[in-house]
Structures are given as structure tokens and as C-alpha cells.
Image (cartoon, rainbow, N blue to C red):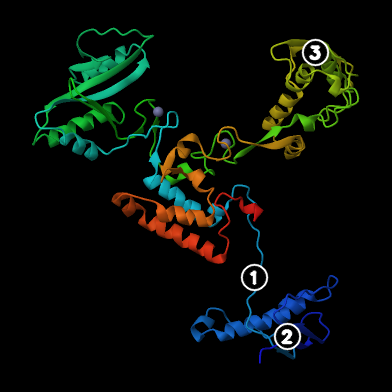
């Protein structure tokens, strides 16, 4: 017959006074009482302690040896109790940078995945970046039709202004004979004069070959030389035909933008390599909010409308405000809301280039001083002091005038442009983390990869799927990867 209640007799743990209690089973029971009355002593040190002891005893001898012996609580008897485990609520993730993805380690594997098989795109024009090994470049060229005349070029300057006298001299000194300059073949021992204000393209002619069997070694050497001179680039040109640009680095063929090696840290918003420079990887910025600087627009400045600066009673501050009021064509007794936008702007954001002559006397010494400089504005003043101050009290005080704004540079995606330009299954890593657990599972289920990518990422997928499956089984499929851990 199933037990209906837990019956505790003679509980004397800590300050419990030999009590007897009956608790209904399979219900939600709450133990209440004043502090020190023995709630925890009854719930944890007596009932749970005994339940856990029974749980451990239900395990095999092998498992028990790792857990050690449990003390029997000070109680005469407990009936109707099942083996028990206790689950404690833990909220250890106060760090604003932690997300569901980072605390489950799934994001670590995503970073690895993007570093290994992510497809880079130019962050300026969106074109796929070129990246091939020397071997791959050679293999492509070996497929050219037999008998095709081709030249290996090293593009050392691509559409940049300058005279390049020294560079050309050095190239000739290194033994190269010809270069293609702005599309024209030139001998390098001729004196070449380039207009320093024009954009030029200079490609050294490294080698000339005829496609066919037996050129592989020479082609490899030449491609290697070309790449060395042009910092990762080589052009294979068929005179009168096509001209192909290859890159050993990740390079945009149009914009002259190159990326370094992609490593997992590039996709981390917690490192300077990956974090958006606009928000340091937080996804939002703290900005001075004029509505908090002037919380009551019915007041005039003389009445303390500008909360951050209070009543301009000190001689210096009152002189500044008087000068700004004069500059803006208003008075310190005008209510804030009665001022024009332009007048308010002068107080909040300053006078720009316009200098104000301010004379004041020190409140303490009576010493007279004079300055003549632009007024920076209350908002700019607070911003500047927030950046400069090393006092946490001052920074906290200034934060009381700030509100969170989504970062304009990354739109809240927390990563820099380069990191966001890599895609797997045409998704960048930030967009992928907007998926919830269920959607992430579907995404990886449907992802199409070529055999090489599959091979490289097999283990990574295994780790990701294991963790996603665990979260699905726990029943939190609605959580998104980018959810801040602190909100759970
Ligand atoms: Zn581009
Ligand atoms: Zn940002």
C-alpha cells in the first residue's frame, strides 16, 4: 500500500525539542516559522539527511565507496520516507557577459566551429573572401588547357597612390626584370616615374610558363615567390585572356581588405580580438540621458533644473551658466521647458567652437580669475568625467544620469565586423545564437557540409549536439543561446 504521509518521531537535531510531525506525501509542503525555530533542522538536517542516507544505501557497494558513510540524524524514527536527493537553486552567474551559450560551453564549440569551417566575407562589400593554400592554387592552374601561355604575377601594389621609387628599385635589385604597371608591361631597369597623386597597380612578372605536364614544380616555386612578395596574393594571367587573383590569406578581391588567421578567440565577445569596439562586447552602451540630467523641466536653472550641476550657487559655476545663458539668448530664471531646443542644446552640449569669457572670484580666497574658452556642455562634461574618473563613487554617481542604449556599431551583436562576417550555413555566429535550443537542434540537423568540412567538424558537432540534447531533455528548449545568464 502506498504511503500517505511522512511520519517523524522524536526529532532532536540541533534545537528541535523531541518533536513529532506528520507531513502529507506527494504534495507541496511548506515549513514556516520564525527565524531559529528549527525549520532547516527539520527539513534538511533530519528529513532530507535521512532520505539521502537511504538513497546512498540504495546504491551499489561500488558507488557507495565514493560517497562515504552518512551519519544517521538524531531522530527516533521516520516512516514513509523515500530515498531523496536535494536540488539547490544556484545563481552564480552575475557576470553580465555570461549567456546560456557560454555557461553551457556550447558557445565555446560554436567558436571553434566558426574558426574551422566558417566562410569569411568582406565586411565592407559582402563578397566571399578568397583563401587557398599554395597547393590548391597550383592544382587550379594545372587544370588550364595544355598549351595555354600564362604568367605568374605578384601584385605588390593594388590601386594605391604613391611614387613607389624605392619599391621598384628594390624589386629590380632582387633580380626581377619586368613588371606590369597599370596594365602595361615595363622593364624594371627603365626609369619609371609614377604620379604620386594617382592610384597605381604594380604586378611583378615572376614567371612565364606554358601549361602542360611537367610544370608543377616550377609553377609551385613561382607561386610561392609571388605570394611572398605580395603578402599572400598571386595573379595567374593568361595574356589576352582571363586573369585570376588567388590569396593565401583571407582577402577581398575588390576592397583590399585582409583578415588574419581565424581562431576561436575572434568569435569571443570577451576578448579584444572579437569584441565590438563600440561597446567592448557588451552589446549596449551607457549614455548620458538628457531626461535624467534635467528631470523636472518646470524648473529654471536658477532653481536647479540641471540636477547634475545642482544650484549654480558657486561663483564659478554661476558665472559659466550666466555666460551660456547670455550666449544662448535666455536667462537663468527661465523655466527649462520655456527655452528653445537650441538654448537647451547650448547648456547640454556646449557652445562648440564659440569661446566664452568668464570672470569669477574664488569663494574661499576671493582671488579673481578669468578664462576664455568654449563651454563643453553638461552632457559632454559628464561623459568626459565618466571616462577619466578613477573614483568608483563618481562613476556610480554619473551612471545615475545614464541609460542603456543598444550599441550602434554592432546592433547588440557584441562582435566586431570581421567576426560577424563569417558564416556557417549562411548564418553568422551572433544570428545563430538567437535561436532557441530546439531551433539550434533543427539548424544543425539540416546543415549541409562538404565532405572535408564534415571531417573537420565531426567532433565539434558531437559535443554541440550532446549539450543541446541534454538541454532539450531538461525541458528548456525555449531558451536562446544569447540569453543573459543573469536573467535565468
Ligand atoms: Zn570587399
Ligand atoms: Zn557593439
Res 189 → quadrant: top left
Q: Secondary structure at mark 2?
A: strand
Q: Is mark 2 within 8 Å of ligand 2?
A: no
**Residue for point 77% across, 19% down:** 341
Tell me if mark 3 has few (under 14), some (14-19) or many (20+) residues whose alpha carbon lies within 10 angstroms of its own.
Answer: some
Q: Are marks 2 and 1 in contact (CB under 8 Å)?
A: no
Q: Position of residue 349 (x, y in %)?
A: 73, 21
Q: Position of residue 253 (x, y in %)?
A: 34, 28
Q: Disc 2 and disc 1: Cα gap in Å?
A: 19 Å
Q: Label 1 belongs to which residue? A: 87
The answer to whether residue 420 shows anywhere in this view is yes
The mark that comes first in sequence, 3 or 1, is 1
Picture disc at residue 6: 2
In-front residue for pair 237/228 = 237
Nearer the camera: disc 2 or disc 1: 2
Does 197 sit left or right of 362 as displayed? left
Q: Disc 3 and disc 2: Cα gap in Å?
A: 79 Å
Res 346 → quadrant: top right
In-front residue for pair 468/92 = 468
Q: Position of residue 166 (x, y in %)?
A: 30, 14
Picture disc at residue 359: none
Q: Position of residue 338 (x, y in %)?
A: 86, 20
In-front residue for pair 29/74 = 29
Q: Is mark 3 within 8 Å of ligand 2?
A: no
Q: Disc 3 and disc 1: Cα gap in Å?
A: 65 Å
- Could you tell me which quadrant the N terminus lies in? bottom right
- Could you tell me which quadrant the C terminus lies in? bottom right
Q: Tell me: residue 280, above or below residue 17.
A: above
Q: Label 3 belongs to which residue? A: 328
Q: Are marks 3 and 1 in contact (CB under 8 Å)?
A: no
The mark that comes first in sequence, 3 or 2, is 2
Q: Secondary structure at mark 1?
A: loop
Amino acid at each position: 500500500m502506498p504511503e500517505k504521509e511522512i511520519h517523524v518521531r522524536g526529532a532532536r537535531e540541533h534545537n528541535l525539542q523531541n518533536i513529532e510531525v506528520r507531513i502529507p506525501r506527494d504534495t507541496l509542503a511548506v515549513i514556516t516559522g520564525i527565524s531559529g525555530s528549527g525549520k532547516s533542522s527539520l527539513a534538511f538536517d533530519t528529513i532530507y539527511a535521512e532520505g539521502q542516507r537511504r538513497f546512498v544505501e540504495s546504491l551499489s557497494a561500488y558507488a557507495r565507496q565514493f560517497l562515504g558513510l552518512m551519519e544517521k540524524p538524531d531522530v527516533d524514527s521516520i516512516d514513509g520516507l523515500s530515498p531523496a536527493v536535494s536540488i539547490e537553486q544556484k545563481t552564480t552567474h552575475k557576470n553580465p557577459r555570461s549567456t546560456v551559450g557560454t555557461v553551457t560551453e556550447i558557445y565555446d564549440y560554436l567558436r571553434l566551429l566558426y574558426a574551422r569551417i566558417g566562410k569569411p566575407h568582406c565586411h565592407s562589400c559582402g563578397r566571399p573572401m578568397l583563401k587557398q593554400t599554395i597547393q590548391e592554387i597550383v592544382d587550379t592552374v594545372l587544370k588550364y588547357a595544355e598549351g595555354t601561355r600564362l604568367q605568374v604575377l605578384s601584385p605588390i601594389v593594388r590601386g594605391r597612390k604613391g611614387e613607389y621609387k624605392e619599391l621598384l628599385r628594390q624589386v629590380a635589385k632582387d633580380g626581377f626584370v619586368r613588371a606590369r604597371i597599370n596594365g602595361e608591361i615595363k622593364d624594371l631597369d627603365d626609369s619609371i616615374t609614377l604620379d604620386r597623386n594617382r592610384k597605381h597597380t604594380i604586378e611583378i612578372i615572376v614567371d612565364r610558363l606554358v601549361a602542360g605536364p611537367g610544370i608543377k614544380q616550377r609553377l609551385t616555386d613561382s607561386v610561392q615567390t609571388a605570394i611572398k612578395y605580395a603578402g599572400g596574393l598571386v595573379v595567374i594571367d593568361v595574356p589576352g585572356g582571363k586573369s585570376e587573383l588567388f590569396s593565401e590569406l583571407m582577402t577581398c578581391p575588390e576592397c583590399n581588405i585582409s583578415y588574419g588567421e581565424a581562431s576561436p578567440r575572434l568569435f569571443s565577445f570577451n576578448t579584444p580580438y572579437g569584441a565590438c569596439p563600440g561597446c567592448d562586447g557588451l552589446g549596449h552602451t551607457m549614455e548620458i540621458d538628457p531626461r535624467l540630467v534635467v528631470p523636472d523641466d518646470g524648473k529654471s536653472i536658477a532653481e536647479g533644473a540641471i540636477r547634475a550641476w545642482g544650484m549654480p550657487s558657486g561663483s564659478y559655476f554661476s558665472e559659466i551658466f550666466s555666460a551660456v545663458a547670455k550666449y544662448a539668448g535666455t536667462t537663468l530664471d527661465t523655466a527649462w521647458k520655456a527655452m528653445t531646443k537650441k538654448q537647451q542644446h547650448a547648456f547640454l552640449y556646449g557652445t562648440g567652437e564659440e569661446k566664452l569669457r568668464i570672470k569669477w572670484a574664488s569663494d574661499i580666497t576671493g582671488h579673481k580669475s578669468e578664462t576664455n574658452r568654449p563651454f563643453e556642455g553638461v552632457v559632454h562634461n559628464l561623459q568626459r568625467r565618466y571616462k577619466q574618473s578613477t573614483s568608483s563613487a563618481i562613476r556610480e554617481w554619473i551612471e545615475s544620469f545614464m541609460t542603456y542604449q543598444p550599441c550602434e556599431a554592432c546592433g547588440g551583436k557584441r562582435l566586431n565586423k570581421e567576426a560577424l562576417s563569417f558564416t556557417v550555413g549562411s548564418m553568422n555566429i551572433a544570428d545563430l545564437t538567437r535561436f532557441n535550443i530546439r531551433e539550434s537542434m533543427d539548424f544543425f540537423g539540416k546543415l549541409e557540409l562538404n565532405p572535408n568540412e564534415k571531417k573537420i567538424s565531426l567532433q565539434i558537432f558531437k559535443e554541440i549536439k550532446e549539450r543541446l540534447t541534454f538541454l532539450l531533455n531538461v525541458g528548456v528548449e525555449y531558451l536562446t543561446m544569447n540569453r543573459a545568464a543573469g536573467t535565468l
